Amino acid sequence: MSRRIVVAPVTRVEGHLSLNLDVADSGRVVAAHASGTMFRGFEGIMLGRDPREAIHLTQRICGVCPVPHARAAVEAVERAFGVEPPRNAVLLRNLVQGAGLVSDHLLHFYHLALLDYVHGPSLPPFTPAPAADQRFSDADAAVLAEHYLKALEMRRKAQEMAALFAGKMPHVMTFAPGGVTQQPTAANVAEFRATLDDLVPFVEGTYLPDATRLSETYPEYQEIGAGPPNLLSFDAFPDGAGGHLFPAGKCVGYRRARGREGSRDGERRPDGRGRQALPLTDADVASIDESVRHAYYGTVAGRGGSAGGVAQPDLDKRGAYSWVKAPRLGARVFQVGALARRIIGGSHRGGLSVMDRLLANAHETVQVAAAMRTWLDGLSLDAPSYRRVATPASAGRAVALTEAPRGALGHWVEFADGKVTGYRIITPTSWNASPRDDREAPGPLEHALVGVKVADARQPVEAYRVVHSFDPCMGCAVHVTVI
Amino acid sequence: MFTRRDFLRWSGRSAAALGLSQLGLFRLEQALAGEPSAPLIWLHGASCSGCSVAALNAVAPTTFAELLRDRVSVEYDGLLMAAGADLAIRTMDGAVRANDGRFLLVVEGGVPTAAGGRYCVIGARDGAPVTLLDAVKDLGPRAARVLAVGTCASYGGVAAAGSNLTGVLPLADVLAGRTARPVINVPGCPAPPEQLFRIVIGLLAGGACALDADGRPATCFPHTVHFTCPRKHLPQAKALGEAGCLLELGCRGKTTTAMCPQHKWNNGRNWCAAAGHPCIGCAMPDFPASPLTPAVAST
């Protein structure tokens, strides 16, 4: 026998998420349904508009991670126009996107995830708190509370860095077809570098050690919350010479090494079965489709690899329980995010779990902060960062893929007579928080929750830990295919 | 860190900016000396959480952390609160009961009204869905003041653009005739955190917060962007990124009421025109107008 727990709302996520957990008498979750509970109905906003406006409008899908939307939108339009941005622009976009990623991972760890393990100061909104198993001493909890506050300041500084080249944050103003309208100067480069010098010691000396300590303090979460063993990453952060900081790839049937020896990040060796990342082909991308079987939409939304397909909402659809659609690649479920990126990039050979996800974010923050120095050094103050597009194409279609902090992001655009005729976006949280698909396969978050043992059904903090490890962004997930 | 003493010093300096008389300032000092923090409830609707992110970016007149510690008791905020699920909703209910008529209600995002509000469900009470529409209709009349934070809550914004099939309405329309005092609009995409916190602090100090025709605090939105733009006397720029006036490239600065040239964004780091891009009018009732920047679309 099992009973159903309604977890609504799941707090400390961007947007609106709820869970239905079917819990057995033993307290174990036997089935989970994740629901995106807000629909904005963007249909018709982009249709009929100049494709360049997607750069501004699609960012409004998410104020937490607007930069990857701005970048995917501008690169899709550039591709359709046949425009190549100057090298400075590529690096400036990397710097804005990199600073956004650092800001976002800090917000996620300290402000969204950490309160699942440590009680904050005894004032609202930190009280009341779920009566979770608290394993840190009062002294350690006080230190983490200080780090919570320090991280607020650090993520704010990362946003300020991004604004130096973005104009403002959130919502980038400077990405335009042809480049970045903010030229690098001695002053803004120096200020970016000085702020980065403030950030790096915190990321390396506080964030990564705190994440490591959390993992050691809650070791069972190195096993809990694996999710499906398929991982996907697009490529992101081009170096301007054909390479990327994050390479594209997919991994099907990933397996962790057995035994305690292999339980630490990077120390394991692959057992050779499905562990190798495969290249991501155009056919793979074309095979991405979105199931709406259990989503509140009346018509099939996705057509493989194209921008078209209008999804009409249907609030009373039988069997539907989420506004999130279920993207699948080759009909398979994939999880996306920093852990997927690090496995595909060859820097993580460990497991899939709550703690592996939190640690992957922390390691990646260190990696991106270091890469930002290289991109800064590569800027040329004398070279242009923007070149006007004299004759924009009036018709075209293109796709642009990148990585948001939470995972793979794709924008598909089609336009004719200078007006958008189709615009499709598939976000990371659409992958991770997707509902069941045409084959009844659960989404990654739903999959990861099965088997989790919940001590207090009214305050299922164990489930929160799994959910927060994915850092869901529901505003992104429920953006609608055509906007 | 910011202390209560600093706050008093700041308020003394800014009594005029807050719209406070000397008597008001005296009352503020009294309030700070004895009273517990003012309760605040922050609801997310059809939003992107960008206004929350912007609020976390603020430094002046206060940071969010300082406001939390010294002045405001954030009883409900889905993005930051520790509690979830039933505990979160019960916390909100308890805070409303305990502070009936005394709490500040902040709504970020549009309010979908079609299909009885079912397009935005913010949680569940006893297993039944609670829509944002239910929540604002319930809480709005019981709040001391209601703030519509961001262009979506103020005017519909991106959430209401296009065919608006979820029936997003401005918060003030949803609550028309239901609140003791008019809804305060703090438009902008995102809402400028300097203005937001200035307004909140002013309200806590007992300021009346006079509103203009668009429901904005008049003292916070006194000019167009163009009026104070340092570029307005420069020659016209011929391309984005050039150091000239961006009017001929479609800049909406002449028709957009906002303080961007003065406070800029991200604590003075940069702002749109300084970064070479025309104003897109993100604080205006018609945002996102089509075309966003008229001249660009016509090139």
Image: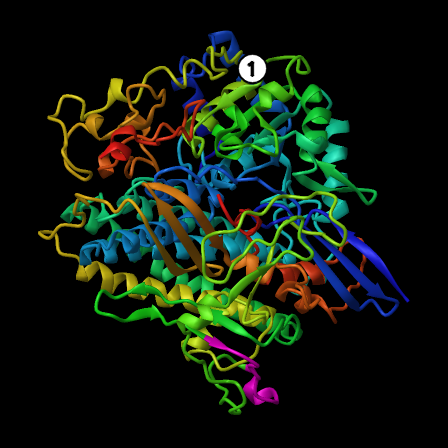
Chain at tag 1? B
- The residue tagged 1 is B206
> Secondary structure beneath disc 1?
loop
Asked whether residue A423 appears in the rendered view, the answer is yes
Q: Residue at x 34, y 54 (%)?
A: A76
Point out the residue furthest to the right here: A1
Residue A2, percent from left and from top: 87, 64
In the displayed image of the protein, which residue is found farthest to the left?
A382
The answer to whether residue B207 is magenta is no
B82 left or right of A236?
Answer: right
**Residue A259 lies in magenta, yes or no?**
yes
Who's the residue at 62% across and 23% down the image?
Answer: B34
Corner quadrant of residue B124: top right
Q: Is residue B221 above or below residue A442?
A: above
Residue B153, placed above or below residue A92: above
Which residue is more in the foreground, B147 or A321?
Answer: A321
Q: Which residues are magenta?
A: A250-263
Q: Quadrant of the N terminus of chain A?
A: bottom right
User: In this image, A434 relative to A305: left or right?
Assistant: right
Q: Is residue A408 left or right of residue B99?
A: left
Q: Is residue A301 left or right of residue B63?
A: right
Q: Residue B69: x percent and y percent? A: 55, 37
Where is B181 relative to B96, above or below?
above
Residue B19, percent from left and from top: 45, 12
Question: Residue A161's x, y, as percent?
Answer: 31, 48
Front in this rendered view, residue B209 or B150: B150
Residue at 51% over, 65% down: A288
